[in-house]
Image: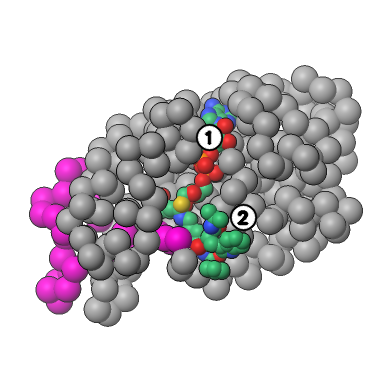
């Protein structure tokens, strides 16, 4: 582990962690891009847009039903647990996750923004009512609300706005955060892709954890290459030793 990274992290006043699909890869959940990515078999614009859903809700729900099956059997991995440890170590802490799998929540983490929603929640396409739907597999596709309207997953698709409460909280924390750890994201989907640059512009320190370089590597102060389930627990261990 890079000594100066650990040293710098011990001095953090306000720690922000951002995660993407890579943090859940070691729980057996496919990422979106890359060799075994979800987009390899499906075109994003066929599945992750409102247009696609309105055209063919059955195909879109079948994709979510398949993913819910995988995620329902998955457990948080050492990377998720290490981020919960970081929350316990830093007074000012926020996790912004792009993941909709809910695995961070299952570690008991409290300060979390699920910026792209959660695939265990549904939204009524008529009334906008939000509900939980835990059935795996789904009993009927597409699932319907009590009012008879089709339900949609409560997630953010391409071209849709991030919910304002999630965006406001993220921007507030971005403005005051002095240290960012960005984990397992390809850094190509906005607005989150712009967050590391915002932290840099405000004079903050950015550490990237990924198995390979990404566009974020060019602006990060340090890049730690390897599995997040190995690197993050090691980082926590070193931080704890340094604080003794
Ligand atoms: C490991 C590992 C291990 C593997 N350990 N690492 C500005 C400029 C250009 C375009 C736009 C812009 N602003 C908005 C846009 C449009 C669009 C966008 O960003 N397009 C780009 C593709 C160019 N953004 C939006 O539409 C967003 N809305 C918005 O901004 O509203 C306002 C607006 C709209 C339109 C125009 C302008 C403004 C909404 C984005 C919603 C994204 N939704 C999805 C689906 C969510 C639901 C679902 O899951 O079903 O979110 S798409 C998908 O990508 C998903 C992810 O959260 C997101 C990011 O992917 P992520 O997490 O980075 O995964 P991967 O697979 O790409 O990367 C995995 C990484 O892990 C890799 O780097 C691996 O190396 C690594 N890894 N194993 C560590 N073990």
Task: Tell me residue 105's x, y (percent).
Answer: 47, 46
CA separation in Å, label 1 and label 2: 15 Å
Quadrant location of the C terminus in the rendered image: top right
The numbered disc on residue 97 is none
Q: Residue placed at 26% from the left, 46% from the top? A: 63
Task: Tell me residue 49's x, y (percent).
Answer: 37, 61
61 vs 1, left or right, is left
144 vs 44, left or right, is left
The numbered disc on residue 192 is 2
Task: Tell me residue 126's x, y (percent).
Answer: 24, 78
Segment tinted magenta in the rendering: 133-158
Q: Residue placed at 56% from the left, 53% from the top? A: 189
7 over 98 or under it: above or below = above
26 vs 43, left or right, is right
| Badge count | 2
Q: Residue placed at 82% from the left, 29% from the top? A: 6
Do we see residue 80 in this rendering? no
Q: Within 10 angstroms of label 1, few (less than 14), some, or many (20 or more) residues? A: many
Q: Which one is nearer the viewer's eye here, 109 or 155?
A: 155
User: Is the CB of the residue bearing disc 1 within 8 angstroms of ligand 1?
Assistant: yes
Q: Looking at the image, is mark 1 or mark 2 earlier in the sequence?
A: 1
User: Is the CB of the residue bearing disc 2 within 8 angstroms of ligand 1?
Assistant: yes
Q: Residue placed at 25% from the left, 68% from the top? A: 54
Q: Main secondary structure of the magenta part?
A: loop
Q: Which residue is mark 1?
A: 22
Task: Tell me residue 14's x, y (percent).
Answer: 78, 51
Determine whether the residue tagged by mark 2 lies in a helix, strand or loop. Answer: helix
Q: Quadrant of residue 146?
A: bottom left
Q: Is residue 150 magenta?
A: yes
216 over 142 or under it: above or below = above
């Amino acid at each position: 582990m890079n000594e100066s990274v650990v040293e710098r992290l011990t001095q953090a006043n306000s720690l922000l962690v951002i995660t993407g699909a890579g943090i859940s890869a070691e729980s057996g959940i496919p990422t979106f891009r890359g060799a075994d990515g979800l987009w390899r078999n499906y075109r994003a614009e066929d599945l992750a847009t409102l247009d696609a859903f309105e055209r063919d809700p059955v195909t879109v729900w079948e994709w979510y039903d398949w993913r819910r099956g995988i995620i329902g059997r998955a457990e948080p991995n050492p990377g998720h647990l290490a981020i919960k440890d970081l929350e316990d170590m830093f007074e000012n802490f926020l996790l912004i996750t792009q993941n909709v799998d809910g695995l961070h929540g299952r570690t008991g983490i409290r300060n979390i923004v699920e910026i792209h929603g959660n695939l265990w929640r549904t939204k009524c396409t008529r009334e906008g009512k939000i509900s939980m739907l835990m059935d795996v597999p789904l009993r009927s596709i597409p699932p319907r609300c009590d009012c008879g309207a089709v339900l949609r997953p409560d997630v953010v698709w391409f071209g849709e706005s991030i919910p304002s409460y999630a965006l406001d909280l993220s921007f507030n924390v971005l403005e005051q955060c002095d240290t960012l750890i960005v984990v397992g994201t390809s850094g190509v989907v906005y607005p989150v892709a712009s967050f590391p640059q915002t932290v840099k512009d405000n004079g903050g320190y950015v550490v990237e954890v990924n198995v390979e370089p990404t566009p974020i590597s060019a602006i990060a102060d340090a890049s730690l290459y390897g599995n997040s389930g190995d690197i993050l627990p090691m980082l926590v261990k070193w931080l704890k030793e340094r604080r003794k």
